[in-house]
Image (cartoon, rainbow, N blue to C red):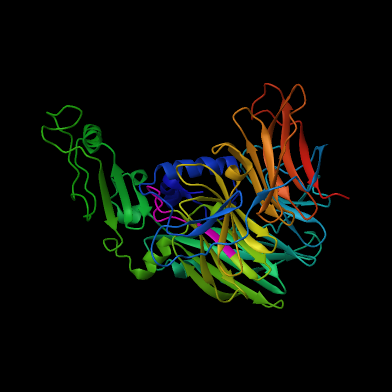
Amino acid sequence: MTTDPRLASYLRVRSTAIDLPHAGVDTITRRARRHQRRRRAAACGGVATALLLGGTAIALGAGGDDPTTSTTDRAASVVGSPLEWTTTEVQDGLGLAGPVVSDGGAVYALSTEAGSDTWGSRRLYRSTDGDSWTGVDLPADLHAAGVAGSEGSLYAVGTSAAGGDLQIATSTDGGAGWSGSDVPLDLEALAEGFPGTARIADAEVAVADGTTVVVASVRGLVDPAEVLPADADPDAWYQTSDGLTRIQDDPCAASAEEGARSGATTTVPPTTSAPATAPAADPEGVDGATAGEDCTPTREVVTWEEMGVGEAGIALAEGQTHVFVATDGGPLEPSQVIPGTTSLDPMTASLLAADDGFWYVRQSYGDQQPGEGAATTAWHSVDGATWTEVPVAGGEGLVASGVLDGRPAVVTIGNQQEWSVHVHVVAADGSVATTDLNELLGIEPGSGMMAVDVGPLGLAVVFQDEAGVRTVAHSPDGLALSAVEVPAPADGTRETVAGVTVTADAVKVRLNVRPAGSDGTTPATSQRLFVGTPPG
């Protein structure tokens, strides 16, 4: 859920149009592990929570006199599954999909094509039973990043194909027809005087009780060509909270290689932490080093001040979330700008409509490189106009969020010592009750978390152990948890987990079926659904 080294490519090639998938959780897990291995600080993160293990509430925090949450007397427990589980096979199921939403009749999701195990272009799909799905055409100029449904209406928000302008479209007939309008976000004005561009990383929409809320995560991305010499390698620099940064793991070897290649020195702008001129190749040294030369890895920074970037530009570079609100069918109007470091990764934010208003959940990082200081924060608003911050989890990777029993719930990957799956439920008083699913259910930490979803029927997480055995963990409220083993594939077949969806009437694990011995490049022949439904 972090961009890590990919930030450099974002600085140059990221399109202004959004086509942003919610990645599979196995991908997210790998990202979280890679990101956490690179953290230099131990991370409980400065957030105090109540960790609920088998009914025992344990206060966790980072010290200090001002804990951000309180413990709770609600303890998690293991129960028998309240659902009845069956299997069925379909030909037109979902691919890799985002959250499922409903307009009060059908259900919808942004997804890749059925049978896909890799992320690619997504489109909107519709289903009346949650099993079989058909494509729905969006407005031709809209690249949707988020969808929502409410009382017979369907909403899609994203960017235009022409240049990244934020748009919202509404349908009252199941996607047969759409009406659209621009969201008043002026990216050019935001980037005025900034050595680069302002880009939309993600956009989400939520609707409740006649109020529509749209959030857009925006970051300023430096164009290295505007601040570095023409002969500098832009791939070697990445954006951090300090400015543009370059780390040379072996500066002596790098100097030798660059000098041998060019026969000249390379000049970079004066920086606060490195010489103005990098040394040329050393003709006498071994492996590029002269006697007595310090070959310790170096960190060079071109600071914001040296680039001429002021406070407004720094705030844009650190990331900001722009909120827009419409009431009673009126136009969207700017509401609030939520500051703070945001990831460029669209999987790190979601907008929820809960019993007590709207919740915006996001993951942030102290720096995109080397990847320090991850934290998950929720922002709450009763009406979409005024937002209050609620810290949720520090030092963990955000993988999903939704509403459990009317309350916002956040699913994260644990810290760098244990890769446990944690569920955090935010209570009405702002306290956060955290349940360790691995500990509670006896699932070995590090077992692959293959899919997760939070929906009207609760939370569902699909685990897979080293032997390939899959287990579905389900909870209606984040406290009462059950675990059911997924039946093995039929003889002569192999299956991959495409995802899990939680709707108002079922939990459905999607398994792409292929011939035994085939790999992921072989098209799936069908999709098997492992379905849990309430009795009766």
Q: Which sits in the foreground, 271 or 233?
A: 271
Q: Residue at x 21, y 33 (%)?
A: 256
Asked if residue 155 lies left or right of residue 346, the reply is right
Q: Is 299 placed above or below 330 here?
A: above
- Taking the magenta stretch, the answer to whether it contains residue 369 is yes
* Residue ranking furthest to the right: 536
Q: Position of residue 287 (x, y in %)?
A: 20, 28
- Taking the magenta stretch, the answer to whether it contains residue 525 is no
Q: Which sits in the foreground, 535 or 325?
A: 535
Q: Position of residue 307 (x, y in %)?
A: 29, 61
Q: Is 429 placed above or below 130 here?
A: below
User: What is the chief secondary structure element of the magenta stretch?
Assistant: loop
Q: Residue at x 62, y 43 (%)?
A: 120
Classify residue 166 by image quadrant.
bottom right
Regarding residue 21, the answer to whether it shows in the image is yes
Q: Which sits in the foreground, 66 or 493?
A: 66
Q: Which residues fall within the magenta stretch?
A: 360-373
Q: Which sits in the foreground, 117 or 387?
A: 387
Q: Position of residue 173 (x, y in %)?
A: 81, 63
Q: Position of residue 324 (x, y in %)?
A: 59, 72
